[in-house]
Image (cartoon, rainbow, N blue to C red):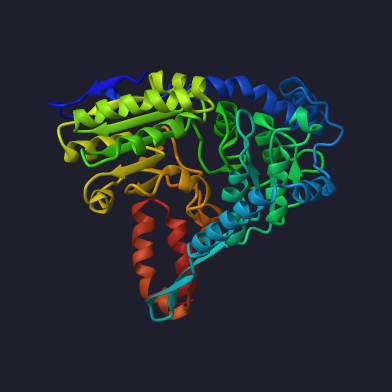
Amino acid sequence: MISRIDLRGTQGDPRQALPRAELDVAAAAERVRPLCEDVRHRGAEALVELTERFDGVRLTDIRVPKDAIEAALDGLDPAVRAALEESIRRARAVHRDQRRTDHTTRVVPGGTVTEKWIPVDRVGLYVPGGRAVYPSSVVMNVVPAQEAGVRSLAVTSPPQSAFGGLPHPTILAACALLGVDEVYAVGGAQAIAMFAYGAGPCERADMVTGPGNIWVAAAKRLLKGVIGIDAEAGPTEIAILADATANPDYVAADLVSQAEHDVVAASVLVTPDEALAEAVTDRLAVRVAATKHGDRVREALSGPQSGIVLVDDLDHGLAVVDAYAAEHLEVMTADAAAWAARVRNAGAIFVGDFSPVSLGDYAAGSNHVLPTGGCACHTGGLSVQTFLRGVHVVEYDREALADVAHHVVALANAEDLPAHGEAVAARTDPA
């Protein structure tokens, strides 16, 4: 069911040997280019036609009526409501503490530089639809934007024919709980174009965030620069670094939980213990047979993006998971906290037996919108910082400028930009 990759006795960069989903975003970007151009030029009319083409829904209005959002909350299962409210409470507690404060540095007497943190003015938040329903992604997008102080935010999610062409009611209910009443029934690449260019009642946004399929990722790549983006989200992935002390059933359960997302989801175990690998393989057979989406899970676990990687020892395993740079990394070892502290590349790190990825998906307080495809080596997950811009405010008085003027002039002349120096000299040289 799941392949095995033996890296024992090998040295050097392991990335070419590690399992990874193939994702040709560049080719997809060319396919979505005409869709995005159509939205750019024809606005809401194009959105209606594209939604009918791709989602099988004929919209009369791309914006979800406010009363439909309120009705979704009224009809929400009380247990789900309580769970969402707790998820929101925990996410707010974590994200509120991320907010940076302005800081002023006195460089010299009379000369200061202040780093001022200013929120993005307007953001579009994408919540995927498809095989699963993701009200948790509403929470993960909206909470950090609100805590950053974003003035205007809108949510979009694909329309569902089963719900009268509206997004899933649980998604609408989550919006209601968060006080969001600007919601659109638009999905796919055309939703990213809607935020990038504006269309109908939707004003253009400065940034778009949120996970999605390859078409959403492709539109983000294509329109980056027209609109700010968080990241290009690829197939979800989990890596687990485990040793002989790990519980094989916990490991198997977590590999299955990630594989449940999609047939291209990646589930990777890295271990120096062959007996653990055997035990996990046995438990996978049992759990896949018992789980609701067994066919989907089996295909994901059998795919080239998943596997069990055997390593020499935990130091070797640490090098491998750092090279893999997983979206989610679980550490299930003796002294797990110490090993987790040495990890450099991961979207989020889950430490020990009782911190599964599923907890982070819903109610740890952390954010589950995370970098995929190895991008965790240079990109972090969605946070309050995503929605903030650091702006330097420079203030020098006459004396402070005069004191450094000769250095500015020297550097300006060295770069053959004498007018730069003249702009300073005009203020500091005697008339």
Q: Which residue is the extreme one toward the left? A: 9
Q: Quadrant of residue 111?
A: bottom left
For the point 51% across and 26% down, which residue is it? 262
Residue 418: horizontal and vertical position, in percent?
Answer: 43, 56
Above-or-below relation of 108 to 123: below
Residue 189: horizontal and vertical position, in percent?
Answer: 65, 30
Above-or-below relation of 171 to 287: below
Above-or-below relation of 423 to 133: below
In this view, the residue in front, 429 or 79, is 79
- Which corner quadrant holds the N terminus? top left
For the point 41% across and 39% down, which residue is it? 327
Residue 278: horizontal and vertical position, in percent?
Answer: 25, 25
Q: Is residue 167 left or right of residue 216?
A: right
Q: Is residue 263 left or right of residue 344?
A: right
Residue 429 seen in the current view: no
Residue 379: horizontal and vertical position, in percent?
Answer: 42, 44
Q: Is residue 298 left or right of residue 221?
A: left
Q: Quadrant of residue 429?
A: bottom left
In this view, the residue in front, 142 or 76, is 76
For the point 69% across and 51% down, which residue is it? 78
Residue 398 seen in the current view: yes
For the point 53% across and 19% down, which residue is it? 27
Q: Is residue 87 left or right of residue 250?
A: right
